[in-house]
Amino acid sequence: MIGDGGFAVTATELRTAVARRLRLTVMVFCDGSLNRIELKQRALGYGGTATRLDDIDLVALAGAMGCDGVRVTSAAELEKATTGLATRTGPLLVEACIDPAQYEAQFQGGVAY
């Protein structure tokens, strides 16, 4: 499990997983920003600077690296996408589109809880 910002730094590791035929599932939580950094900037009185991520089609990226990829936007879609993981022969990337609003409550006064 990783956020879209962290995945942007480590995405090419999927090639290693493909080469090694690892039955790995990578869950990428996509909210289009480096949300924790943005919240901390705001708590310090700064505007969000360099925290927005352009949309990247992670399903297409997974395919380009030889992995399967699926985009989910609900728990039901996630359950369907992860059915049969034990029988997979290679990596699966799950792009989980999430609402970043939940972070606001966890980040009070610049402190992450």
Image: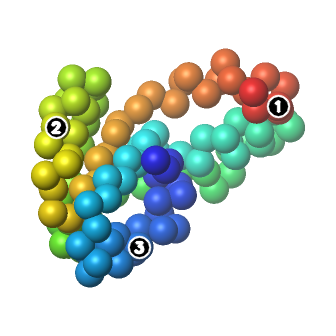
Residues under labels 2 and 1: Cα distance? 37 Å
Give me the disc on residue 65. none
Give me the disc on residue 83. 2
x and y percent of residue 74 in the render?
A: 27, 25
Q: Give the quarter of the figure containing the C terminus.
A: top right
In this rendering, does residue 60 appear at all?
Answer: no
Looking at the image, is 105 positioned above or below residue 103?
above
Looking at the image, is 77 positioned above or below residue 41?
above
| Mark 2 or 1: the one toward you | 2
Q: Which amino acid does the dot numbered 1 rest on?
A: Val
Q: Are marks 2 and 1 in contact (CB under 8 Å)?
A: no
Q: Are marks 3 and 1 in contact (CB under 8 Å)?
A: no
Q: Residue at x 29, y 47 (%)?
A: 94
- Pointer 3: what residue? 13
Residues under labels 3 and 2: Cα distance? 24 Å
| Mark 3 or 2: the one toward you | 2
- Pointer 1: what residue? 111
Of labels 2 and 1, earlier in sequence is: 2
